Image (spheres, coloured by chain):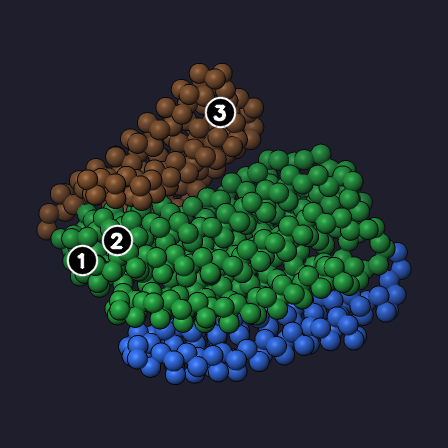
């Protein structure tokens, strides 16, 4: 069983999604900076960073759990869920506490990975396969 | 022990945040767990395709989880917003926002787990068209998120509504009813949309050449399944934006609360029922594509009839709001 | 604010109407949807019997609708008679 190959495919997919999410966030941030909307730019980059961390941990935790005993796997699964939600709450709390981060931009940034996945598979892929 | 208004508002917002995140996590957990279970089944049947299966599982789980992230956003807002409270209506509005988002996330979380799980099994059957299957699953899961988005819109409106000039006595119940109406009605619609999406993914795996027709009937079925949530949204808007005269009686607030409960619970059943109808119709369009015209018509008739109970519930809540 | 007995009865009647219609709508909604689904399945297997199957589906749905109508009647009674 070539697990390393299969694992590389998942890693490649995750890296591609994260790369595009970060690129889109940075481009948006530069556009906002151009219009002197500093809090919007900072918020969207902050949200996207944590969205990527969440998605990355989601993929990693699967391989950490694989092959453990049942009790250990249960404990690690619970830990992964708790830690991921904890991570996602951090940017939201920062966005509420500090006025220099726009809260709405943080919320949009948190959904960056989901938005990129949807756009990638519904708009980009079918258009590419038709050509 | 004396209570001042700020204390009551804090109690309502912290309690609302807890309910919101607690209930919101239930749905996403069930959906993600269903996806993981079917992914395990798929992996045991075809270990050599583990990369594609795990990739699709991750995509599906990321989408199914977004309902819980909506709830997280609302919960954090409820904890840290702490608006300046002048009357007890703020407490009622914040509690209702928590209830609305918490209940509203359940259906979408469970529902978007169905297509995400089916896609793992579908890839075992048809590895060649995995890209198409992923696209179809994403469309289905994204439509499932709509009821949760309705609930989030209502929750945000409840939080930022200006309640300073409103009459306290009947309006507290109106705000609570507005939250319950959309939140509960969204459960059925989310689940129903998920059933249709799951059937569509497994149907395309059976007959890949029916991709276009199956996707179309899935979208029609899901759109009709959303109707109870839209009725709930309508009743919520009426309850939030209608001005109620000040009264000292207890009957008027109970009528408004009853309107919200009626529409909320009344939306659950028709939503799930429409989902069942759409599920079977999608499944059999994929197997017998020549009958797709008659199947679409029969599906719409069946869904319209099962919609009628949601319409009764809406009539009762409108009577409770406007006549009584 | 003193709550009188008649007030309390009216309040209970309103909330009861809401509960009656709300909970009463769950069962018929799911049941009719299930009937519709089974009818679609049967038409998928035998499209030439579509007319008969559609009629049967409508009759079955009308029967399971009756509990929804009972709860509507009870709700309206609670609203206007009590």
Mark 1 chain: B
Residue A31: percent from the left, percent from the top?
42, 21
In the rendered image, what is the letter of the chain coloured blue?
C
Residue pointed to by mark 1: B126
Residue B75: mark in rendering: none
Looking at the picture, how far across and down is residue B220, in whole percent? 41, 59
Would residue B235 appear left or right of A23 to someone viewing this image? right
Tell me residue B28's x, y (percent).
43, 52
Location of residue B313 by image quarter: bottom right
Q: Helix or strand or loop: what does disc 2 sit on?
A: helix
Q: Which residue is mark 2?
A: B133
Chain that is green in the image: B
Give the CA separation, mark 2 to mark 1. 9 Å
- The secondary element bearing badge 1 is classed as loop
| Quarter of the view holding residue C3 | bottom right
- The location of residue B148, given as percent across then percent down, is 49, 50
Q: Is residue C18 left or right of residue A30?
A: right
Taking the spot 55% from the left edge, 63% from the top edge, the residue there is B267
Report the front residue among B95 and B318.
B318
As helix, strand or loop, the secondary structure at mark 3 comes to helix
Check disc 3 and report the residue beneath it. A40
On screen, residue C64 above or below B320: below
The answer to whether marks 2 and 1 mark residues whose Cβ atoms lie closer than 8 Å is yes
Q: Residue at x 48, y 17 (%)?
A: A35
Pick the front one: C15 or A69: C15
Chain A, which colour?
brown
């Amino acid at each position: 069983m070539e697990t390393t190959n299969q694992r590389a495919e998942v890693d490649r997919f995750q890296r591609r999604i994260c790369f595009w999410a970060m690129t889109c966030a940075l481009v948006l941030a530069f556009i906002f900076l151009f219009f002197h909307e500093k809090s919007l730019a900072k918020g969207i980059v902050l949200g996207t960073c944590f969205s990527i961390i969440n998605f990355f941990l989601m993929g990693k935790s699967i391989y950490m759990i694989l092959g453990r005993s049942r009790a250990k796997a249960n404990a690690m699964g619970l830990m992964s869920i708790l830690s991921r939600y904890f991570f996602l709450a951090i940017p939201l709390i920062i966005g509420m506490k500090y006025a220099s981060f726009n809260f709405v931009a943080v919320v949009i940034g948190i959904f960056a990975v989901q938005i990129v996945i949807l756009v990638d598979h519904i708009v980009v892929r079918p258009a590419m396969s038709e050509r | 022990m004396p209570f001042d208004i700020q204390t009551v508002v804090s109690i309502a917002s912290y309690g609302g945040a807890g309910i919101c995140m607690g209930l919101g996590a239930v749905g996403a957990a069930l959906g993600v767990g269903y996806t993981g279970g079917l992914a395990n089944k798929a992996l045991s049947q075809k270990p050599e395709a583990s990369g594609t299966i795990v990739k699709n599982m991750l995509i599906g789980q990321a989408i199914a989880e977004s309902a819980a992230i909506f709830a997280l956003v609302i919960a954090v807002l409820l904890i840290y917003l702490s608006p300046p409270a002048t009357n007890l209506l703020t407490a009622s509005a914040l509690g209702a926002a928590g209830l609305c988002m918490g209940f509203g996330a359940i259906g979408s979380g469970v529902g978007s787990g169905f297509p995400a799980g089916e896609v793992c099994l579908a890839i075992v059957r048809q590895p060649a068209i995995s890209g198409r299957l992923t696209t179809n699953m994403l469309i289905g899961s994204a439509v499932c998120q709509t009821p949760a988005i309705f609930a989030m819109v209502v929750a945000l409106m409840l939080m930022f509504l200006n309640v300073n000039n409103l009459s306290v006595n009947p309006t507290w119940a109106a705000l609570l009813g507005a939250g319950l109406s959309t939140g509960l009605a969204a459960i059925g619609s989310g689940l129903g949309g998920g059933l249709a999406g799951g059937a569509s993914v497994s149907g395309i795996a059976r007959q890949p050449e029916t991709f276009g027709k199956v996707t179309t009937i899935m979208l029609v079925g899901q759109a009709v399944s959303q109707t109870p949530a839209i009725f709930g949204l309508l009743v919520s808007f009426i309850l939030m934006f209608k001005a109620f005269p000040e009264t000292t009686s207890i009957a008027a607030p109970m009528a408004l609360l009853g309107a919200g409960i009626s529409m909320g619970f009344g939306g659950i059943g028709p939503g799930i029922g429409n989902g069942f109808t759409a599920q079977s119709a999608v499944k059999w369009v994929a197997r017998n594509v020549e009958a797709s015209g008659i199947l679409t018509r029969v599906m719409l008739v069946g869904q319209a009839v099962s919609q009628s109970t949601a319409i009764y519930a809406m009539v009762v809540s409108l009577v409770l709001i406007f006549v009584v | 604010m003193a709550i009188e007995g008649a007030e309390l009865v009216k309040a209970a009647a309103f909330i009861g109407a809401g509960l009656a219609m709300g909970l009463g709508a769950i069962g018929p909604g799911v049941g009719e949807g299930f009937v519709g689904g089974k009818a679609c399945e049967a038409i998928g297997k035998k499209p030439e019997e579509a007319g008969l199957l559609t009629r049967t589906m409508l009759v079955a749905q009308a029967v399971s609708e009756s509990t929804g109508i009972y709860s509507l009647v009870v709700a309206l009674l609670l609203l206007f008679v009590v």
